[in-house]
């Protein structure tokens, strides 16, 4: 793992955007794996700035997001579809048809997971996957479990994740209880991974994930086995 320490959230975001921007410049038709949550917001803002300054051209880029809530319409302000539109897609020249998230409104969740996994493979796999990390070590919605999930799957969210996500809702009962998420295998097949860890409250899980034993109880710990994983840390 290549671990980069940043002093501030702004520095973390700028560094992450440079790495993603460099991928777009070196491979204009790259396939990027994107993440939602509080952590990547600053990175997306930097990427928008680079686009506005004429540094980046998104016209050939394709994106696959890690996950989406299940049973939540995309028009809902808390859908990850909506998040990506508001934080990145509507501000850059990416083609809408090249942006992908699991369809959280699909009738058959299992069928949708299989379709999404096949679409990633048909696109040639992910060149660079951006990740955040949950307080319990989850990546995407791969929650602590007895085994690593291999492919995109329908997951039941843990109490820890429902509690963390309830900050976006009027009350905890409104938080969706399940999601469609890339599996650990899907994430590990990305050719390059960029993990962002920000905030003092993430220092403990960062220590476990980066330096502790590799275990499905701390899903992010598997990234220790990825050949091209860069971590940007701002946890002091
Ligand atoms: P956060 O979420 O960036 O909002 O802390 C990260 C995650 O749960 O993956």
Image (cartoon, rainbow, N blue to C red):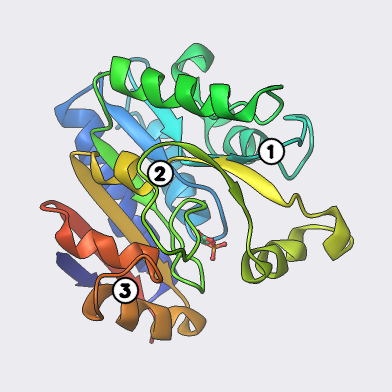
Give the residue drawn at x 31%, y 73%: 209
Is residue 68 positioned above or below 235 on the image?
above
Q: Quadrant of residue 83?
A: top right
Q: Is residue 199 or residue 127 the one in the foreground?
A: 127
The alpha-carbon separation of the residues under discs 3 and 1 comes to 27 Å
* Local SS, label 3: helix
Q: Residue 152: horizontal and vertical position, in percent?
A: 45, 36
* Local SS, label 1: loop
Q: Residue 231: horizontal and vertical position, in percent?
A: 26, 64
Label number found at residue 70: 1
For the C terminus, which image quadrant?
A: bottom left
Q: Tell me which label, 2 or 1, sits earlier in the chain.
A: 1
Label 2 environment density (alpha carbons within 10 Å; few <14, some 14–19, many ≥20): many
The alpha-carbon separation of the residues under discs 2 and 1 comes to 15 Å
Query: Horizontally, is 234 left or right of 70 in the view?
Result: left
Question: Which residue in the structure is indicated by mark 3?
Answer: 209
Q: Residue 224: horizontal and vertical position, in percent?
A: 19, 65
Q: Residue furthest front?
A: 146
Give the residue drawn at x 66%, y 23%: 108
Label number found at residue 183: 2
Does any portion of residue 105 appear in the rendered image? Answer: yes
* Local SS, label 2: loop
Query: Horizontally, is 83 left or right of 132 in the view?
Result: right
Give the residue drawn at x 33%, y 80%: 208
Query: Horizontally, is 124 left or right of 98 in the view?
Result: left
Give the residue drawn at x 71%, y 22%: 107
Q: Marks 3 and 2: which is nearer the front?
A: 2
The alpha-carbon separation of the residues under discs 3 and 2 comes to 17 Å
Query: Horizontally, is 217 left or right of 107 in the view?
Result: left
Q: Tell me which label, 3 or 2, sits earlier in the chain.
A: 2
């Amino acid at each position: 793992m290549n671990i980069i320490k940043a002093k501030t959230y702004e520095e973390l975001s700028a560094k992450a955007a440079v790495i993603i921007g460099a991928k777009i410049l070196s491979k204009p038709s790259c396939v990027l794996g994107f993440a939602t949550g509080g952590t990547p917001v600053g990175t997306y803002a930097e990427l928008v700035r680079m686009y506005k300054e004429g540094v980046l051209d998104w016209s050939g880029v394709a994106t696959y997001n890690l996950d989406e809530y299940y049973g939540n319409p995309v028009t809902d302000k808390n859908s990850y579809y909506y998040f990506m539109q508001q934080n990145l897609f509507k501000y850059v020249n990416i083609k809408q048809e090249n942006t992908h998230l699991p369809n959280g409104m699909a009738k058959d969740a299992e069928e949708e997971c299989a379709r999404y996994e096949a679409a990633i493979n048909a696109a040639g796999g992910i060149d660079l996957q951006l990740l955040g990390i949950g307080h319990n070590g989850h990546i995407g919605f791969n929650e602590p479990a007895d085994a690593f999930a291999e492919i995109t799957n329908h997951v039941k969210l843990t109490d820890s994740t429902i509690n963390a996500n309830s900050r976006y809702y009027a009350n905890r009962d409104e938080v969706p209880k399940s999601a469609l998420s890339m599996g650990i295998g899907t994430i590990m097949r990305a050719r390059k991974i960029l993990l962002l860890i920000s905030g003092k409250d993430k220092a403990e899980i960062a220590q476990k994930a980066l330096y502790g034993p590799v275990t499905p109880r701390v899903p992010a710990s598997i990234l220790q086995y990825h050949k091209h994983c860069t971590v940007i840390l701002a946890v002091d």
